[in-house]
Amino acid sequence: MSTSERLIESTRELLWERGYVGTSPKAIQQRSGVGQGSMYHHFDGKPDLALAAITRTAEEMRANAELEFGGPGSTLERLAAYLRRERDVLRGCPVGRLTQDPEVMADATLRRPVQETFGWLRGRLTELLTEGRERGELDAALDPVATASTIVAVLQGGYVLARAADSTEPFTEAVEGILGLLAAQRGPGVSPRP
Amino acid sequence: MSTSERLIESTRELLWERGYVGTSPKAIQQRSGVGQGSMYHHFDGKPDLALAAITRTAEEMRANAELEFGGPGSTLERLAAYLRRERDVLRGCPVGRLTQDPEVMADATLRRPVQETFGWLRGRLTELLTEGRERGELDAALDPVATASTIVAVLQGGYVLARAADSTEPFTEAVEGILGLLAAQRGPGVSPRP
DNA sequence: GTCTATATAGCGATAGAC
DNA sequence: GTCTATCGCTATATAGAC
């Protein structure tokens, strides 16, 4: 792995574990095994390196979600696959946690990938839900826009609850809770495939 | 306001805005207008002061929630009152944000109030939902434990989405989305009071 | 490209005078 | 109780040799 690559990957880990405010250039150097001089040769400084790390994490998150959204099955099946996918629950969401970082939020450049990721996610879920409603898989009274935000919020809040409890249990409960409520929205339209 | 009081209140604000890692004793002194010597006279240091601040914030959050939970109306009405209560959405949840702070999570003493707050909240909502189900206000198939976690998660995640978007809109959507799904759970049991 | 040296500021706390 | 002085350490770089 190249020097630059190791710096970015170490920064990604540290931002996930400690946030931007809690991560020092020195810690990045130690974790990556890259010296001070090298680091400042490849990157302008902490914000520059953080931008590379955040951008990559955001892209990865989006690609992983699209894997489930574009997968096989009914709308509810794809939603369940997305929500139940294996996650590093106790570490939290590497993008969501950045919304709690005052310096990331104060810097438009660092903030943009965070904003775009959640904007995309809500939009993509709105599409899925709308499609499910049109196919008669979901009740016509369901609000796709609001429900999309609800689903993303359940995941993000599930991480918070899991970290507070130091247990994955509340995350799993929150996910199963929303799936139960969504299942009750099954319209009369479509019968299971034979 | 006493010196001690001003220190605690300033620490509460700073923990809310910047977290534990992002808050320095110096910043606390400046915001409170209390000198270095005074601060270390009244408190042992940063962790001690933070504990006082976190404990108070947690107690306040619990008391505010109980105001709605123990209020008038049906189960769904009390849930709606709680979820729709006016909140400082863009500032986020002062307790939830601490789950993202590595030093709070690593210190059992600082962590405990956070853990207890969410434990209590989930338990209290489980009670409410169970009661609503027994009264026939909610479908018998609804899982009170899972749904309680879902509701708390929607709020916590709603804050994350609002901060990411720099807008209260996704928070409101998430809340209305879950209320819509819960309303669809209305059992046939109870008619509105005359 | 990578290294070591150096710099300014702030962190988190202690000491002791008033 | 409050103030100022001081401390050892880290944060975030920059400079210039190799």
Image (tube, coloured by chain):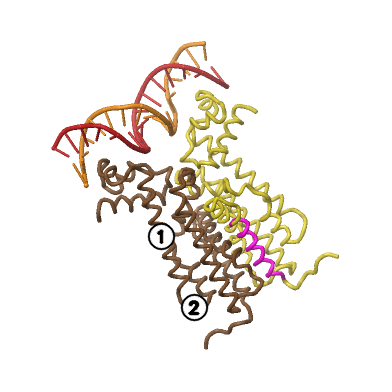
Chain colours: A yellow, B brown, C red, D orange
**For residue A76, which numbered disc appears in the image?**
none
Q: Which residue in the structure is indicated by mark 1?
A: B59
Q: Which residue in the structure is indicated by mark 2?
A: B73
Q: CA distance from mark 1 to mark 2?
A: 24 Å
Taking the spot 52% from the left edge, 77% from the top edge, the residue there is: B74
Q: Is residue A180 above or below residue B188?
A: above
Residue B28 rendering spot, x and y as whole percentages = 33, 46
Question: In this rendering, does residue A93 appear at all?
Answer: no
Taking the spot 57% from the left edge, 64% from the top edge, the residue there is: B148
Of marks 1 and 2, which one's residue comes earlier in the chain? 1
Chain bearing mark 2 = B
- Magenta segment, prevailing SS (helix, strand or loop): helix
Q: Quadrant of residue D10?
A: top left
Q: Are marks 1 and 2 in contact (CB under 8 Å)?
A: no
Q: Is residue A118 above or below residue B81?
A: above
Q: Is residue A182 magenta?
A: yes
Residue A170 rendering spot, x and y as whole percentages = 58, 57
Q: Amino acid at mark 1?
A: Glu
Q: Is residue A40 above or below residue B115?
A: above
Identify the residue at the far right of this view: A194
Chain bearing mark 1 = B
Q: Amino acid at mark 2?
A: Gly
Q: Secondary structure at mark 1?
A: helix
**Which mark is nearer the camera, 1 or 2?**
1
Q: Is residue A3 magenta?
A: no
Taking the spot 72% from the left edge, 71% from the top edge, the residue there is: A187
Q: Quarter holding the N terminus of chain A?
A: top right
What's drawn in magenta, residue-wise?
A: A170-186
